[in-house]
Image: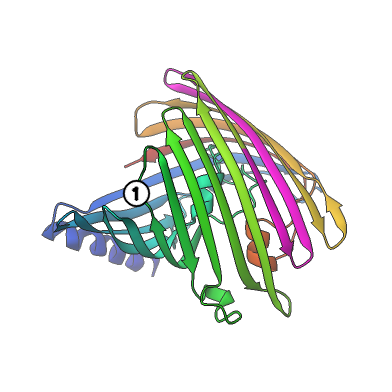
Amino acid sequence: MKKLLALAVAAAFAAPLAASANPTVYGRVNVNMVHEDIDDGSSDAWDVQNNASRVGVKGSEDLGNGLAAVYQFEFGVDASDSGDLSGRLAYAGLTGGFGTFAMGRQWTPYYGSVDKSDIFQTNGMNDEYLGLTRVGNAVAYVTPNFNGLSGKLALVIDNGGAEDVGDDFADWWNLSVDYDNGPLSVGFSYLTAQGTGAADIVNGSLWGLAGKYNFGMFALIGQYETLTDVDGIDADAYAIAGELYLGNNTLRAKYGKQDFDIYGSDYDPSNWVIEAEHNFSKRTRVFVSYEDSEGSYGLTGLGKYLVGDYSSATEHQRFGIGIRHDF
């Protein structure tokens, strides 16, 4: 079945390519050999880990008068084991002088504006991040760029398990404002949502502010987030990160921390990460990374999408060596 599915996806990509040279097939294979030592003794072993490997197709059609149709399909691929596919992106839209309007499964404006410290090749190195990365059933609008200033608005209508939550038109909405000009990048985002908790409708909101400045040989990154009024849960999180560029090599480091108030109990987990990367070319690189996580992490991703899962991870250390190839 997995082979048949893979062949079906390949055929779906190949068919439009035969009719037009415009669609672009792209992908990434990112795997590493990682050793994880969990402090409670439940794991102390080596494994091969997949790091957001993917394959996709994207393109556009010129409709004339400055108007174009845009589309993208992207599937996550488990490169470490089964090769199973999972949906990452799937949307279509229109773009022109008015900006871009799209519907489907998309990146959240919040992620693009706030999670600037997500710079590492190994998955799970941004434990402090409180936001959502991608979401389905989304209707989004991106403004034109005004000398580096732009805005993004997204609505999610009846999203998955939160279908028909409450009486509002949208289950949640997300507004972001970004400024990108030369070495400076700054983003602010606000997200408010409804979800289904253990028994009742759960409301919550999240805002974040992040910035990056590239000095040429190195860059500094900072971000701050606040999660409020999520079924008795409040949280603050911040991260400070940096990159040092040495020819074909990049050195990275980050410290992140959360302060949780979960049903009257306080938690303050933190983690720090270092990574070294060598680029053989624009498409192929190798990397080595190390993470030390202290304290138990609970809800992440807008309260695990508003208290859908309340579990905590144990203190752990991870060391990995990997390779990434883009095509």
- Compared with 158, 38 (above or below) is above
**Residue 159 location (% of width, % of height):** 52, 72
Q: Is 207 or 17 nearer to us in this picture?
A: 207
Q: Which residues are magenta?
A: 223-251
Residue at x-position 48% and y-position 66%: 155
Q: Quadrant of the N terminus?
A: bottom left
Q: Is residue 124 left or right of residue 218?
A: right
Q: Residues within 10 Å of mark 1 (few under 14, many from 20)?
A: some
> Vertical placement of 92 versus 147: above or below?
below
| Residue 13 % position (x, y) | 25, 60
Picture quadrant of residue 257: top right
Relative horizontal placement of residue 100, taking residue 250 as reference (left or right): left
Q: Residue at x 34, y 30 (%)?
A: 282
Which quadrant of the rendered structure holds the C terminus?
A: top left
Residue 163 position, x and y percent, is 55, 79
Q: Identify the residue under disc 1.
A: 144
Amino acid under label 1? Pro
Q: Main secondary structure of the magenta part?
A: strand
Q: Residue furthest toward the front?
A: 146
In depth, the one of 310 and 111 nearer the eye is: 111
Question: Taking 211 as reference, is 6 left or right?
Answer: left
Circle 1 — which element?
loop
- Quarter of the view holding residue 126: top right
> For the image shown, how many numbered marks are present on the structure?
1
Q: Looking at the image, can residue 6 be seen?
A: no
Residue 238 painted magenta:
yes
Q: Is residue 68 magenta?
A: no
- Vertical side of 93 occupied by 240: above or below: above
Q: Residue at x 64, y 52 (%)?
A: 130
Tell me if residue 217 comes above or below residue 324 in the rendering.
above
Q: Is 168 on the left or on the right of 225, as rendered?
A: left
